[in-house]
Amino acid sequence: MCSFGGLLMPKTGSGDANCIVVKLSSGYNVGIDAGKIKEVKVVQKAAANENREKAVAGGKGSVEMGAKAGVSEGDFGNGLISLLGCGGTIASKVEYKTGAVYPASSPQEIVESFPDISRISKIKSRVLFQLLSEDMTPKHWGIAAAEAADEIKEGAQGVVLMHGTDTMGYTSAALSFMLQELPVPVVLTGSQRSTDRPSTDANTNIVCAMHAAKADIAQVLVCMHKGMDDSACSLHSGVRVRKMHTSRRDAFVSVNAKPVGEVDAVSGIVRAHGECVKRDAGRKLKLFEKVNGNVALVWVYPGMDGKFVKKLSDFDGVVLAGSGLGHAPVNAFGAKGANSILPALGKIIEKGTLVAMAPQTIFGRVNMNVYTTGRMLLEAGVVGNMCDWLPEVAYAKMCWALGQEKNPAKAAELMLKNIAGEISERSEIEKSLWACVGGF
């Protein structure tokens, strides 16, 4: 005879009515035929949580819940926190009939998946999208920015967006440009592993994100695991963060900058690393949500030729992720058999396509002054020289800049203006590259 001990899971509207599901201490679930159970022993009943009394309020499709939390060290936004679901693994739940994970369809489902957050602050939850992040478009960035702005204008003391991790860096960058003069923090978080897995990072990430949303910070942040354990999460600038691993819980790192801070997952204390933008209730939020999605991000590669570049003329903007210091094939010395994209590149720029350079090395700064190749690209009209932005940040910024200005020259001026810390004045020297990325 087998015996199992664990948490009795609630029944769902689908599946075998005679099957009960128990979550074991390992985190895995076991299904048991109720007709074959010899004995059931109740070890402990779940205590009622007054903080989870729900009352639908705040508009259609939203739910408010959780009592106002007591002020603890590091709490500055001790009021309503808006939780916006944008899809992704973290905003999904297990369907016990098939074992598959699917997007949560209601705000109640999202909040009930993470009972710990209702003890941190009063929460207003809404579902914006039910999308995997790879399916998002620049238009979704604008919608998310506008919705976050509405929440802040209605009194939210912080906003947390639950988002898929694959393209989180794109969205965080776009929001950094769209939401200017923020009075409170806007925090993106997600999970590398779904909530049905024992190794899920979802609960730690969202708990830390909630604490970050109450901290004395007022900028767009990404809150994800600092290390492989559940002790802390790092807070990254929305324009300096990149997913650097396919599956590790600590996949997100700050590039060409230090993390803004970190959150202790146990105490909830937020520690800032150096200077950051502080809260200011009197600061007036400026929303610039317009985007132009007709932009391409193109990796420079060996064998790239003019025929390919000609096809880019249909785009209003192109970001080239160049090799080295910001290079592309131009055959600077007329070598036999070498390709040059320069004639085709010059033509699409003349016709009005904005072209910017970013480093595919990820770390470091574009410097097209060093080699003849770079200088030829500069002369052709490629912008972005001396910028230390990430390729995806440059892409998001170009979508945003062309949404503000249709004129390529004026959009180029916006591209080269430091809006949210995406372009630094100087590069810090690290002892090693591994120190930059956290020592994977």
Image: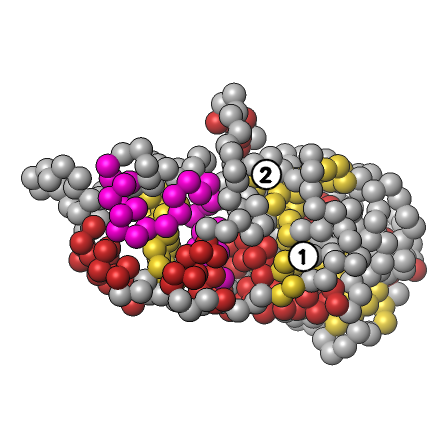
Between 280 and 435, the residue placed more toward the observer is 280
* 50 vs 146: above or below: above
Between 36 and 256, the residue placed more toward the observer is 256
Q: Which mark is residue 139?
A: none
Q: Pinpoint residue 285: horizontal percent, then vertical percent.
A: 69, 62
Q: Which residues are magenta?
A: 372-400
Alpha carbon of mark 2 to alpha carbon of mark 1: how far? 30 Å
Which colour scheme appears in the figure?
Answer: secondary structure
Residue type (three-letter) at the residue carrying disc 2: Asp
Q: Pinpoint residue 117: horizontal percent, then vertical percent.
A: 79, 54
Q: Nearer the viewer, mark 2 or mark 1?
A: 1
Q: Quadrant of residue 204?
A: top right
Q: Kindly identify which residue carries mark 1.
A: 181
Q: Which mark is residue 250?
A: 2
Identify the residue at horizontal 40%, vertical 67% (top origin): 407
Identify the residue at horizontal 59%, vertical 55% (top origin): 176
The secondary element bearing badge 2 is classed as loop
Identify the residue at horizontal 76%, vertical 51% (top origin): 279
